[in-house]
Image (cartoon, helix red, strand yellow):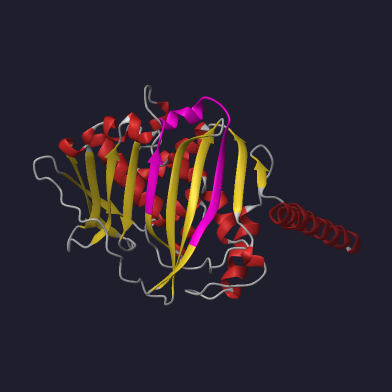
Amino acid sequence: MDRVSTLVAVASGVSVVYLFHSVFYSSHVIFKTQTVFESQTHLPASLYLMTRYFYQSLRKKRGQMREDKETNDELVLTLINCRYDGTSLRRFCSVSGYGWDYPDSVFRDLPLCFPEFLFKRLITMIVCSDRFKLCPSGLLVVCETVSLSEAVDELKKGPFSLQASVYEYRTVSSGVEVDLTLRASRHQRPVWSSTVTLLSPRSTHTPEAQPDLNITHDPASERCISLAVPWSSAVRCAWVFGDVFGWWRLTRPAAHPLWMLAKCIAEMEKHKGVEVVRAPLTVSVWYKQPVCLPRKVNIRVSENTSETTALFSMEEQRTGTLFVSGQIKRLTTEKAE
């Protein structure tokens, strides 16, 4: 009996040491020493990043910039030699309104928001870094501008790189904002890029939304789609997206910002055709407030052919409270260049 107890204790100890080394120590070394990562090698583990998320949340205060020697360094992370992965696409499509069988359909382009899904680990690494000046807990997505210079399907044709960086911090009345720049490119030519503005609010209450473009749908072309969004959607998005925007929302279930945008774009494609999201184009999005779950929402989409723009919005079905609004602006080839 004593021998069995000893063997169990030794096996447990070896398992703990192995787990610590493989998950925490190796992830810590990679996280601290590298800024360029090879996609075929292991990135810092999710468990390690979650631990850093809680550590940085305790170390930094919401709505304040932490100024010290560590945070003054440039923060740029790059993932090279990435390859198209059908499994990742299937996971994204299964929660974002395209359906799990979307990748099996022929003559279907990659969804416009799919590249942002690929940045989930890099974004998490940035906001959990010592060099990031804001508290990662409670970050809100305020607005986003997506630029598509070539078809997203270009990422299927060969290796591509992903780069995420901190562009600018600025103090606003409700806290501190930061712009993150995301860029997916092939052969050093950008295919897809985005500037995401995050807000670290001073209080735990959702701040008043900033002024945005007045979205007025054309009744002649408007389509309204009603959706019931259950509480389980927050859990599914947290599992699939696996980033900081999903972790803290589990304590207060709300729709993931990327889910809100992808859902609107998916409905736009279904009702207005895929031509409305053909490159080159820019998408401007304003997030008014989180969609707390469960909730019934209306997605409205419309198109203005004379101005080559398409509009979309998501609102509360009963009260009409606006959650997200945006526009797609199609560009000529000359303007895109």
> How many numbered discs?
0
Q: Position of residue 2 (x, y in %)?
A: 90, 64
Say which quarter of the image contains residue 266.
top left
Region of the chain picked out in magenta, as a range:
144-168
Looking at the rendering, in which quadrant would you find the C terminus? top left
Query: Of all residues shown, which one is farthest toward the right?
Result: 3
Residue 88: x %, y % from top left: 51, 38
Q: Is residue 185 above or below residue 286?
A: above
Residue 324: horizontal and vertical position, in percent? 29, 56
Q: At 47% across and 45% down in the image, what residue appears?
A: 117
* 50 left or right, relative to 99: right
Q: Which residue lies at the image location 23% right of the left edge and 57% below the top edge? A: 315
Question: Any magenta on residue 158?
Answer: yes
**Quarter the N terminus occupies:** bottom right
Looking at the image, is 187 positioned above or below residue 50?
Answer: above
Q: Is residue 171 magenta?
A: no
Task: Spot the residue most to the left.
Answer: 220
Name which quarter of the figure residue 252 lies in: bottom left
Residue 203, x across and y down, in percent = 42, 77
